[in-house]
Amino acid sequence: MNHNQHDHYIATTEDLLELYGEPVPRSLLKELDHISAHYRKFVERAPFVIVATVGPEGLDCSPRGDPPGFARVVDENTILLPDRRGNNRLDTLQNIVRDPRISLLFLIPGVGETMRINGRARITTDPALCESFSHNGKLPRSIIEITVERMYFQCQKALVRSGLWDVESWIDRGELPTAGQMAQAFAGNDFDGAAYDRDYPERMKKTLY
């Protein structure tokens, strides 16, 4: 019997609902159009967030991290994120100025739930705001202002299945190529990967902010 793998692709929402069924009611009840008191606590204690944006070239997903509280809740619909020093690719920022849609996924080490936000963003260089995000005298060049449209927490299943916070599941870093090795692989002999890795800890101290 001939087997056509294309027969098994899901192409419509009707097919999805037939396969999975209706959403669990609680998964819909937890979705808010604002930042509740409980959700605010989660955001303010998170030291890490993954930021997803979209632009003409496609999608981008970028990690952002700072001490807890770096994601500043201004009111029930507004969050501010400082844009710290990076590599100047500006993938996230370029997307925002052309398409304001944004998604955030907040994580807290040791906590199984994550917090998801969908909304719209814009970039401000307001001097007073940038000054308010100063860290050891270093200011962000800009601030991302997010207007929350949808917000809800995700249950623990994904983090439990992955063992993300389980130290016993962590691998030895030596099992993976280093940043220097990966960079040298595409840069060739013009790049000294060993020197890059050797100097990285000191360079990190000088360029973190």
Image: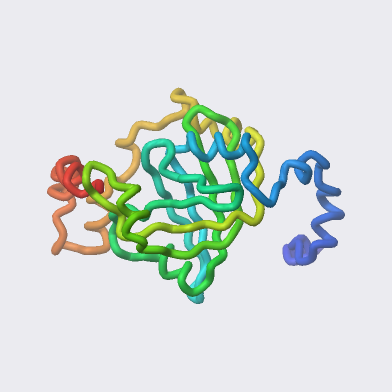
Image coordinates of residue 157 in percent, x first then y, are: 65, 34
Quarter holding the N terminus is bottom right
Between 175 and 53, the one nearer to me in the picture: 53
Between 63 and 121, the one nearer to me in the picture: 121
Image coordinates of residue 112 in percent, x first then y, are: 58, 31
Between 204 and 145, the one nearer to me in the picture: 145
Please report the residue visible at 49 percent of the width from the left and 54 percent of the height from the top. Answer: 51
Please report the residue visible at 86 percent of the width from the left and 54 percent of the height from the top. Answer: 18
The residue most toward the front is 128
Image coordinates of residue 75 in percent, x first then y, are: 56, 48
Please report the residue visible at 31 percent of the width from the left and 54 percent of the height from the top. Answer: 140
Examine the rendered structure and indicate whether residue 181 appears above or below residue 202. below
**Relative to 12, 80 lies left or right:** left
Q: Quadrant of residue 29?
A: top right
Examine the rendered structure and indicate whether residue 69 appears above or below residue 20. above
Query: Which coloring applies here?
Result: rainbow
Please report the residue visible at 81 percent of the width from the left and 42 percent of the height from the top. Answer: 24
